[in-house]
């Protein structure tokens, strides 16, 4: 299946959606970001990038992305989905309380929460994974279980409005699952 395979979801419905992609100011996976960004643009999804601060943020391979919003400026009512992308900077983001209040607002409003790789730890630390079937980087398996998540180790999981992926190799399935879920909401 091609990365740009036309799925059977309603493209008209997809084009009206607004996605918030959260990247860490201290390193995110550039390739994952650009695959998501490129596909969302192709599908007509409105994209906003957020991080701990506004301005330039750098991926692990040196690619710069502009963060339009700091985490504290995000209004959950403005978005249909929040996506946390993996990378070494997640550990710094995990120290910031604002990220957890943001996750709670999206969850309380029944918005889609998505996270890849080690970024799944943010959802776990916020208590959003209690009783949920999830995956993520193997290094956070114990933490997910300790926070009440049902860690499967599969490449991709969805439980309700929570979508998680294990690693960058799962980005294609992660993206398709996000698009299907946006098309259903």
Image: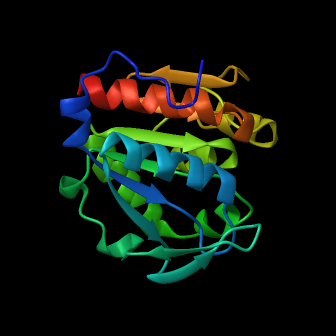
Provide residue 73's location: percent of width, then percent of height: 30, 74
Q: Quadrant of residue 183?
A: top left
Provide residue 126's location: percent of width, then percent of height: 48, 49
Query: From this viewpoint, is residue 148 visible?
Result: no
Provide residue 12's location: percent of width, then percent of height: 18, 32
Q: Quadrant of residue 8?
A: top left
Residue at left offset 60%, top offset 31%? 172
Residue at left offset 47%, top offset 67%? 97
Q: Quadrant of the C terminus?
A: top left
Q: Is residue 153 left or right of residue 90?
A: right
Q: Is residue 1 left or right of residue 136?
A: left
- From the viewer's perspective, is residue 183 above or below residue 87? above
- From the viewer's perspective, is residue 150 above or below residue 146? above
Provide residue 55's location: percent of width, then percent of height: 47, 84
Residue at the right extreme, as displayed: 139
Residue at left offset 19%, top offset 31%? 13
Q: Quadrant of the N terminus?
A: top right
141 or 33: nearer the viewer: 33
Q: Quadrant of residue 157?
A: top right
């Amino acid at each position: 299946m091609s990365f740009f395979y036309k799925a059977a979801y309603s493209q008209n419905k997809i084009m009206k959606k607004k996605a918030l992609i959260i990247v860490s100011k201290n390193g995110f996976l550039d390739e994952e970001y650009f695959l998501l960004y490129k596909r969302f643009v192709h599908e007509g999804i409105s994209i906003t990038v957020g991080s701990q601060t506004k301005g330039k943020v750098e991926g692990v391979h040196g690619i710069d992305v502009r963060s339009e919003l700091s985490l504290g400026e995000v209004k959950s009512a403005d978005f249909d989905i929040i996506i946390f992308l993996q990378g070494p900077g997640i550990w710094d983001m995990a120290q910031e309380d604002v990220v957890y209040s943001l996750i709670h607002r999206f969850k309380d409003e029944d918005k889609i929460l998505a996270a890849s790789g080690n970024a799944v730890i943010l959802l776990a630390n916020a208590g959003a994974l209690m009783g949920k079937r999830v995956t993520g980087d193997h290094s956070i398996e114990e933490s997910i279980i300790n926070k009440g998540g049902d860690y499967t180790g599969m490449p991709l999981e969805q439980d309700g409005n929570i979508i998680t992926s294990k690693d960058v190799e799962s980005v294609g399935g992660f993206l398709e699952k996000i698009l299907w879920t946006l098309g259903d909401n």
